[in-house]
Image: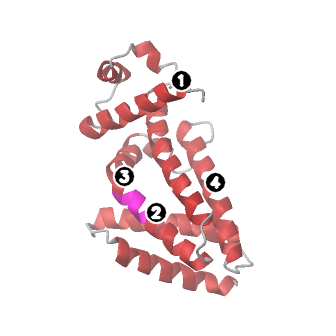
Amino acid sequence: MVLNMEKHKRQAILGKAREWIGANGFSEFTMSKLAKFCGIAKGTLYNYFDNKEDLMVKVVEDRVAEIHHEVEEILGGSQEPEGKLRSMIRQGLAFYRDNLDLLMLYANEVKIADCKFPSSATAHGRFLREHLEWFMNRFEQLLSDMGVKRERRLLAYFFHETMKNLMSFNMLSGRELDIDRDADLLYSFYFHGVEAFQ
């Protein structure tokens, strides 16, 4: 087995960046500080990342890649489609819970300048479009398996945004996330909504 040292080094840098940013915040972050924290030359960072915004997007992408892997496992499992939907909701809520600080930091420091109409020319815009395309393709298939015949792409987008907006509501209102309660709420809200499209 050939070990990809470059990929390993890049992943190690992302891990250290996540650790540093989690402790200190993105506004205090510089490539020089990260290089010192990693014990490498600053120029080495630029072999892997264009700038600090690009690095921050990659940190979030790295976390999102994990949820993509988990979704693939759910969709490839033996559950009925409705069970897969419920599992995806729980998994999504757990992802938000476990990565809330990182996602808030990302939204406030990187995404905010590009959040209205993200351009695919920016790192955030490219990431958002790739993630949404990935998610909607898989969710459309799940909806098809559930017997939904119309507007599957739009419904997939609604699902993604409903999950995100629930978490925004929780943050803004101080409402505590309860995965069991919120998974039931989202499942009922969404499942009964898509029945009209079957």
Specify the amino acid type for callout 2: Gly
Quadrant in the rendering for residue 193: bottom right
Whether residue 25 is in magenta: the answer is no
Residue of label 3: 99
The span picked out in magenta is: 91-97
Disc 3 residue type? Asn
Quadrant location of residue 15? top left
Dot 1, crowdedness within 10 Å: few (<14), some or many (≥20)? few
Mark 4 vs mark 3: which is more N-terminal? Answer: 3
Disc 2: which residue: 92
Q: Quadrant of the N terminus?
A: top right
- Whether residue 37 is visible: yes
Q: Residues within 10 Å of mark 3 (few under 14, many from 20)?
A: some
- Are circles 1 and 3 on residues that touch, CB within 8 Å? no
Residue underneath mark 4 = 134
Picture coordinates of residue 125, whole percent (x, y) = 57, 43
Which amino acid lies under the numbered mark 1 shown in the image of this protein? Glu
Q: Is residue 84 above or below residue 25?
A: below
**Residue at (35% x, 59% y) in the render:** 97
Label count reads 4
User: Of callouts 2 and 4, which one flags the residue occurring earlier in the amino acid sequence?
Assistant: 2
Residue indicated by mark 1: 6
Query: What whole-number distance in Å separates the C-alpha atoms at marks 4 and 3?
Result: 20 Å
Q: Residues within 10 Å of mark 4 (few under 14, many from 20)?
A: few
Mark 2 vs mark 1: in front? 1
Looking at the rendered image, the disc whose residue lies closer to the viewer, 1 or 3, is: 1
Could you give the CA–CA distance between mark 1 and mark 4, rounded to whole angstroms? 25 Å
Type of secondary structure dominating the magenta stretch = helix
Q: Position of residue 107 (x, y in %)?
A: 41, 47
- Mark earlier in primary sequence (1, 4): 1
User: What secondary structure is marked by label 1?
Assistant: helix
